[in-house]
Image (cartoon, grey):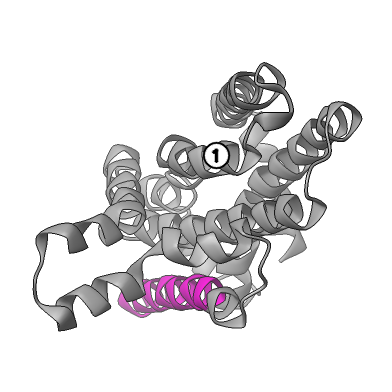
Amino acid sequence: MLAIYKREMRAYFTSPVGYMFCAIFFAVSSFLFMLLNVQAGEDASYTTYFTLLLYLFIIIIPLLTMKLVSEERKMRTDQLLTTAPVTLSGIVFSKYLAALTMFGGSFIVTSIVYFIPLSMYGNPNAAMYIGCVVGVFLVGSAFISIGIFISSLTENQFISALGTVGAIIFLLLVSSLNNYINNEAIRNFLSGLSVTSRYAYFANGLFAYDALLYFISISAVFLFLTIRVFEKRRWSNS
């Protein structure tokens, strides 16, 4: 399991993917921070900064996940993985953990660095800031699990990335569909799928167990589905 994790982490920096992710993430997040916080002074809303980061995930999360499994299928190395002396859950979790490390490491570092000028030149609400950080991290971890699952369904990286983009857009905007639907049952169902409504709890400095369970459940479900895809492929190759 550790060997697979190291292999995936190494792959991010022996190909342009890791550098593209870091470049896009740092550039866009820095621009948003300067635009919304430093230039605006104490009246700036850092909650807007974190909310806009969620929409940045439409671009950067597919970069992390599009080749995690699809490339294995294309190169036929997935057959070696499924016959290796490691559990299927270990394979999937190692790949998930590698992508989460790339995302989480970059995000946590920038969040700490950006908090320093806020605390020096203003009086930010620490609870709300931490809540935003935790909420964005949970959203990102859920989206990564979805991206890995979609990547396991195809050997084409472009299709994998496109499918992940579509899934993220749907989950971010699904609550807005309620404005065009009159059926109460459908409205409640769509609200139940909404990522932004759950994230709002953390953005307001509230720790909601149901919101936490929602994000953990998404990650667990899609990782489980990815394991089932690996399991099906292993039996078909045997």
Residue 42 appears left or right of 177: right
Q: Is residue 89 visible?
A: yes
- Whether 199 is among the magenta residues is no
Q: Quadrant of residue 35?
A: top right
What amino acid type is highlighted by mark number 1? Thr
Q: Mark 1, residues whose alpha carbon is within 10 Å: few (<14), some, or many (≥20)?
A: some
Instruction: Tell which of 118 and 157 is nearer to you.
Output: 118
Name the spot of residue 86 as percent of width and height, x first.
65, 74
- Whether 218 is among the magenta residues is yes
In the rendered image, the residue lying farthest to the right is 120
The residue shown at (75%, 40%) is 111
Name the spot of residue 110 as percent of width and height, x first.
75, 35
Q: Principal SS element in the magenta part?
A: helix
The residue shown at (64%, 31%) is 44
Q: Is residue 237 visible?
A: no
The residue shown at (26%, 43%) is 159
- On-image quarter of the C terminus: bottom left
User: From the viewer's perspective, is residue 123 above or below residue 209?
Assistant: above
Instruction: Tell which of 234 and 156 is nearer to you.
Output: 156
Instruction: Tell which of 73 and 193 is nearer to you.
Output: 193
User: From the viewer's perspective, is residue 60 above or below residue 193?
Assistant: above
Element at label 1:
helix
Name the spot of residue 136 as percent of width and height, x first.
59, 53
Quickly name the residue at label 1: 48
Residue 207 appears left or right of 192: right
Residue 224 appears left or right of 36: left
Range of residues picked out in magenta: 214-238
- On-image quarter of the N terminus: bottom right
Name the spot of residue 92 as percent of width and height, x first.
55, 67
The residue shown at (65%, 26%) is 33
Instruction: Tell which of 48 and 41 is nearer to you.
Output: 41
Q: Quadrant of residue 59?
A: top left
